[in-house]
Image (cartoon, rainbow, N blue to C red):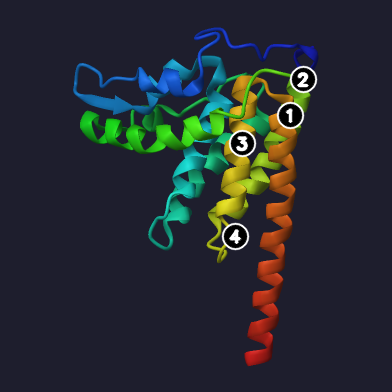
């Protein structure tokens, strides 16, 4: 019965863009910004929104090996999206309580929001065709594959799947079917490209040794 329910509509912040919701976040009374606060603010948008938020840092130039750390949250969220019977992310208590200094958290948001608004400029509610939890689970499986590609340190292979995940996540939060199709296309291309890079690297190593 749960598989056939059309339960994707956000139950809070209806009509607001994800960037607007995040821009309203403020540190708690303890002066810190926690993942629990973020999860509460995102509510029913949390699957797509967390995918967006954990994808965007992978689009910013970072030290080598950073994707090994930044890819793990993507794997966790997409895995839950694939197997969960609920419409929002469940965070273990220890993870939910993870927090950063309020000033540092706001600085991170200041870096993320311009990228998010840039992607949002082309996204709006239209032609939404994922009408069941079963369909969203299939999408979660595809997002999991992309997250694994992001996780592994493949030369030049992380940026494109991270972009695909950001487009997919934002399309889910805004219910944009056209955006989702574009994200899926970018995702398929990025998987093929990453596979080509791995095969080429393997062939080069075989020739050298």
Report if the CB atoms under discs 4 and 2 are less than 8 Å apart. Answer: no
Q: Which mark is residue 127?
A: 2
Sequence-wise, the earlier of marks 4 and 2 is: 2
Q: Which mark is residue 178?
A: 1
Mark 1 neighbour density, 10 Å: few (under 14) some (14–19) many (20 or more) = some
Q: Which mark is residue 157?
A: 4
Q: How many marks?
A: 4
What element does badge 2 sit on?
loop
Q: For the residues marked 1 and 2, what is the alpha-carbon distance in whole angstroms?
A: 7 Å
Sequence-wise, the earlier of marks 1 and 3 is: 3
Asked if residue 155 lies left or right of residue 7, the reply is left
In percent of the image, x 47 and y 28: which residue is there? 91
Sequence-wise, the earlier of marks 4 and 1 is: 4
Q: For the residues marked 1 and 3, what is the alpha-carbon distance in whole angstroms?
A: 10 Å
Q: Vertically, is 140 above or below 196?
A: above
Q: Which mark is residue 167?
A: 3
Sequence-wise, the earlier of marks 1 and 2 is: 2
> Which residue is farthest left?
30
Sequence-wise, the earlier of marks 3 and 4 is: 4
Q: Vertically, is 146 above or below 53?
A: below
Report if the CB atoms under discs 1 and 2 are less than 8 Å apart. Answer: yes
Q: Nearer the viewer, residue 149 or 97?
A: 149
Which is closer to the viewer, label 4 or label 2?
2
């Amino acid at each position: 019965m749960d598989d056939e329910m059309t339960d994707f509509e956000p139950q809070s912040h209806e009509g607001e863009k994800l960037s607007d919701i995040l821009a309203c976040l403020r540190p708690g009374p303890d002066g810190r910004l926690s993942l629990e606060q973020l999860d509460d603010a995102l509510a029913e948008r949390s699957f797509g929104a967390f995918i967006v938020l954990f994808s965007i840092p992978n689009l910013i130039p970072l030290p080598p090996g950073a994707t090994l750390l930044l890819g793990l949250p993507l794997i966790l969220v997409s895995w839950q999206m694939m197997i969960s019977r609920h419409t929002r992310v469940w965070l273990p208590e220890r993870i939910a309580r993870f927090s950063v200094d309020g000033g540092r958290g706001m600085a991170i948001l200041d870096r993320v929001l311009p990228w998010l608004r840039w992607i949002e400029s082309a996204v709006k509610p239209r032609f939404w065709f994922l009408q069941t939890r079963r369909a969203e689970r299939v999408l979660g499986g595809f997002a999991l594959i992309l997250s694994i590609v992001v996780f592994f340190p493949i030369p030049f292979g992380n940026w494109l799947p991270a972009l695909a995940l950001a487009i997919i996540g934002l399309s889910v939060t805004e219910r944009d079917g056209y955006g989702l199709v574009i994200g899926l296309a970018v995702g398929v291309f990025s998987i093929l490209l990453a596979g080509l890079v791995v095969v080429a690297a393997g062939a080069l190593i075989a020739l050298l040794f």
